Image: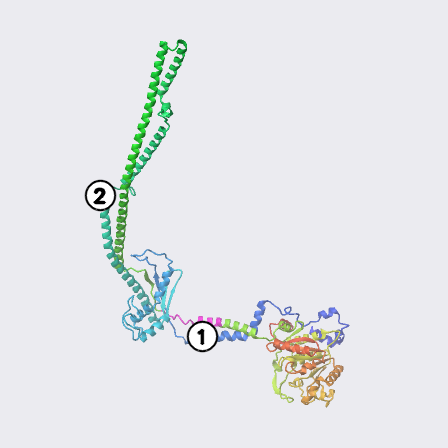
């Protein structure tokens, strides 16, 4: 779009285009603006983009840290001596898995037992035994310690200085590991000599197996001796209990019928059963006799159930009937009546006799049942007394059996212990002895280098984020919006000076500062570069910022020195000069370099004009850039520059307004000097310049506060000069520049 401006300028139609009356709303929308929107609308991106941007800005840290750490790791690795760590593998079964064992078999996942053996392998007693066996210490004694012997020695033995040093070194080089998924324990002892390392490792494994086997053998021998002494006492107890059982059985006549039963037990059960039946019979008979009142047996059921009594009763009834009839017919003294009365008396006597017989029979049965019940009670009492003897017999029997079982169990254990002690079987064996290694175990140079690079990369990333967090400078438009969200922001990439345009520092004859030789504004030296496109975009933004109230005098300000304020002022002036007459006013008397940039050193300038010693037309000089003039700072006395707050400066600017369309004022920094604050009140607008990693947010906020306090002209644009490569507009400019070049 800036090239369109150039073509329109050459054709002479640009003034009409820039006229607010001619420039319509749709046309203004087509004009590109470098101003970024509010925070996060233009340069915002994903979190990954932000992280990549941080890493790109801190590329030096990301390069130095990995390389430095890797070099240190490699150097340290080269200084290390080679260490060989051959491994020996021990298969440790839980107790009870030996060929002959006194202990029950344990489960295969006995983790506590395996961890105990790992600790035993790392014990100082075992290490000292290896040191003494292989004479690893120059002053070590010969032989090895017994399984229960203390290394410091309860007998007064102490470690020599050489043994103490060798013990510490041995423990530092010892490595014992247990695989949780198996019962295998690996042990390794490092040494600089591969043969010696294998010999020490194998000696440690063999000595551990021997010590564990000897300890187990000694424990078995002690158990056998103790069990043998106990076996004699238990056998005597067993004989006594069996003898007492036989004697008691013979004296009392008790014989076993079955397990848990005896003759007295069966007899008592039978007697109880009979006594119960007898008591039931006696109670039944007693109940029948209780029904008889005054010796009358008619209430007994046996009387009513007797067939003979029923026949006699029937005949008696018939006789009584005939007797009653005969009396009625013949009278009381008739022979037939007498005969029937005798027959009645005889039948009644027989009936009474039968009833009395049944009653007597019940009384006899009741007496017999009662006597039998008493007899059963006596028998049960006697049998119960004898059953207590059976209980004593069972107690003796259980005691005899317990003593017999205990004796048999101990006797079996003694036999097994004797066999186990003779076999010397062990639950620990060496499955893979240590071998002589052909290459060192450590240091692993490639791994150390890789780990150094990885650690350096992590350190670099952490350091980069720390530096990023500590960096309070403005780097992106969002940082500027934190100072004031309403400020429009333009992004200008890093202005690279290459080729014949390289800068060479020369002394400035005006103020002794350094100036540049052979410098040309980038719009002249590289008009198609991305930086030139950014400056033209800044020009367009300033032109279109207020169409109804054109900004003629623009103050280029910054917070601190070195933020590129003069560079932006010169290049913006060149860009504006391509559209209309433009003048650059150098008000930075402490670092006046604008006249030298255009290859002219002038001793007359703004200071002389304000002092009244030189006329304004004589101080302004033309440059090789068409329609661009410069009003240098000059060499007036220091007091003359205080006139910037008086009417003389306003009159000078008014005279420049009548001659030029655009006036660019290069001011001193805002924070250290008051000149820029005073100038900001007599211009039409302020262009504030900031630079990443130099302008801090605090400095920019303070500068904006100072300008607000003096009621300065409005800030038209904030220029993020020398923007970093991750800024969005920076990519846009680079894309356009590459497309043009291609």
Q: Position of residue 647 (x, y in %)?
A: 74, 85
Residue found 36% across the figure and 61% down from its top: 113
Colour pattern: rainbow
Dividing the picture into quadrants, the one containing residue 473 is bottom right
- Image disc number at residue 611: none
Q: Is residue 448 magenta?
A: yes
Where residue 167 appears, x then y in whole percent? 34, 72
What residue occupies the far right of the structure in this picture? 21
According to the image, label 2 marks what residue?
251
Tell me if 135 is positioned left or right of 675 in this view.
Answer: left
* Circle number at residue 74: 1
Q: CA distance from mark 1 to mark 2?
A: 99 Å
Return the residue nearer the eye: 298 or 459. Answer: 298
Measured from the top left, where is residue 36 in percent x and y? 66, 71
For image coordinates 58% across by 71% down, the residue present is 53
Residue 600 higher or lower than 684, as above or below:
below
**In the picture, residue 297 is in which quadrant?**
top left
Read off the magenta span. 437-455
Residue 588: in sight, yes or no? yes
Q: Position of residue 487 (x, y in %)?
A: 67, 73
Q: Could you tell me which secondary element the residue under label 2 belongs to?
A: helix
Seen in the image, is 48 located left or right of residue 179? Answer: right
The part of the image, by quadrant, that contains residue 593 is: bottom right
Q: Residues within 10 Å of mark 2 (few under 14, many from 20)?
A: few
Name the N-terminal-most of marks 1 and 2. 1
Residue furthest to the front: 333
Residue 681 falls within the magenta-colored stretch: no
């Amino acid at each position: 779009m800036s090239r369109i401006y150039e073509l329109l300028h050459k054709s002479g139609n640009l003034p009409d285009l820039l006229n607010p009356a001619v420039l319509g709303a749709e046309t203004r929308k087509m004009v590109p603006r470098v101003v970024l929107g509010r925070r996060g609308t233009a340069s915002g991106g994903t979190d990954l983009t932000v992280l990549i941007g941080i890493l790109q800005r801190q590329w030096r840290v990301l390069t130095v840290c990995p390389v430095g750490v890797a070099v240190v790791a490699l150097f340290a690795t080269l200084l290390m001596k080679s260490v060989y760590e051959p491994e020996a593998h021990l298969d440790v079964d839980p107790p009870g898995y030996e060929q002959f064992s006194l202990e029950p078999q344990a489960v295969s996942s006995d983790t506590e037992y395996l961890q105990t053996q790992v600790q035993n392998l790392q014990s100082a007693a075992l290490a000292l035994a290896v040191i003494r066996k292989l004479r690893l210490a120059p002053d070590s004694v010969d032989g090895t310690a017994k399984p229960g012997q203390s290394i410091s020695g309860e007998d007064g033995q102490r470690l020599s200085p050489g043994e103490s040093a060798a013990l510490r070194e041995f423990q530092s080089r010892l490595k014992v590991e247990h695989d949780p998924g198996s019962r295998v324990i690996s042990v390794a002892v490092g040494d600089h000599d591969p043969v010696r390392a294998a010999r020490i490792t194998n000696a440690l494994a063999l000595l551990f197996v021997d010590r564990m086997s000897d300890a187990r053998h000694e424990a078995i021998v002690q158990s056998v001796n103790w069990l043998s002494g106990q076996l004699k006492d238990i056998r005597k107890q067993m004989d006594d209990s069996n003898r007492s059982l036989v004697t008691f059985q013979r004296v009392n006549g008790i014989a076993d019928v079955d397990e848990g039963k005896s003759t007295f037990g069966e007899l008592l059960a039978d007697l109880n059963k009979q006594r119960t039946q007898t008591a039931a019979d006696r109670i039944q008979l007693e109940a029948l006799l209780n029904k008889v009142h005054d010796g009358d047996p008619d209430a007994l059921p046996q009387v009513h159930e007797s067939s003979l009594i029923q026949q006699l009763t029937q005949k008696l009834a018939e006789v009584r009937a005939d007797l009653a009839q005969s009396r009625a017919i013949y009278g009381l003294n008739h022979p037939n009546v007498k005969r029937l009365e005798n027959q009645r008396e005889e039948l009644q006597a027989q009936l009474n006799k039968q009833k009395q017989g049944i009653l007597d029979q019940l009384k006899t049965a009741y007496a017999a049942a009662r006597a039998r019940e008493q007899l059963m009670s006596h028998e049960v009492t006697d049998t119960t007394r004898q059953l207590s003897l059976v209980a004593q017999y069972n107690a003796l029997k259980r005691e005899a059996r317990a003593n017999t079982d205990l004796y048999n169990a101990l006797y079996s254990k003694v036999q097994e212990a004797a066999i186990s002690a003779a076999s010397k079987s062990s639950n620990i064996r060496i499955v893979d002895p240590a071998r002589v290694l052909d290459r060192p175990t450590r240091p692993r140079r490639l791994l150390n280098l890789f780990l150094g690079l990885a650690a350096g990369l992590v350190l670099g990333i952490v350091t980069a984020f720390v530096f990023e967090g500590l960096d309070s400078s403005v780097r992106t438009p969002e940082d500027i919006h934190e100072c004031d969200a309403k400020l429009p922001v333009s992004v200008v990439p890093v202005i690279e000076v290459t080729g014949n345009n390289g800068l060479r520092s020369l002394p400035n004859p005006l103020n002794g500062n350094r100036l540049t030789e052979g410098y040309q504004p980038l719009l002249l030296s590289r008009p198609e570069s991305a930086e030139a496109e950014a400056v033209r975009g800044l020009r367009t933004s300033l032109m279109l910022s207020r169409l109804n109230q054109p900004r003629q005098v623009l103050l280029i300000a910054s917070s601190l020195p070195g933020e590129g304020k003069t560079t932006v002022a010169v290049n913006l002036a060149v860009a504006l000069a391509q559209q209309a007459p433009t003048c650059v006013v150098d008000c930075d008397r402490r670092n006046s370099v604008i006249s030298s940039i255009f290859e002219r050193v002038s001793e007359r300038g703004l200071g002389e004009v304000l002092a009244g010693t030189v006329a304004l037309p004589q101080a302004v000089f033309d440059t090789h850039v068409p329609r661009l003039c410069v009003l240098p700072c000059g060499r007036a006395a220091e007091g003359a520059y205080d006139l910037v707050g008086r009417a003389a400066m306003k009159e000078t600017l008014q005279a420049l307004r009548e001659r030029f369309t655009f006036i660019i004022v290069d001011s001193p920094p805002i924070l250290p000097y008051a000149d820029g604050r005073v100038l900001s009140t007599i211009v039409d607008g302020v262009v504030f310049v900031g630079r990443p990693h130099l302008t801090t947010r605090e400095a920019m906020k303070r500068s904006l506060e100072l300008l607000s306090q003096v009621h300065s002209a409005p800030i038209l644009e904030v220029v993020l000069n020398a923007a970093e490569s991750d800024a969005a507009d920076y990519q846009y400019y680079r894309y356009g520049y590459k497309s043009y070049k291609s």
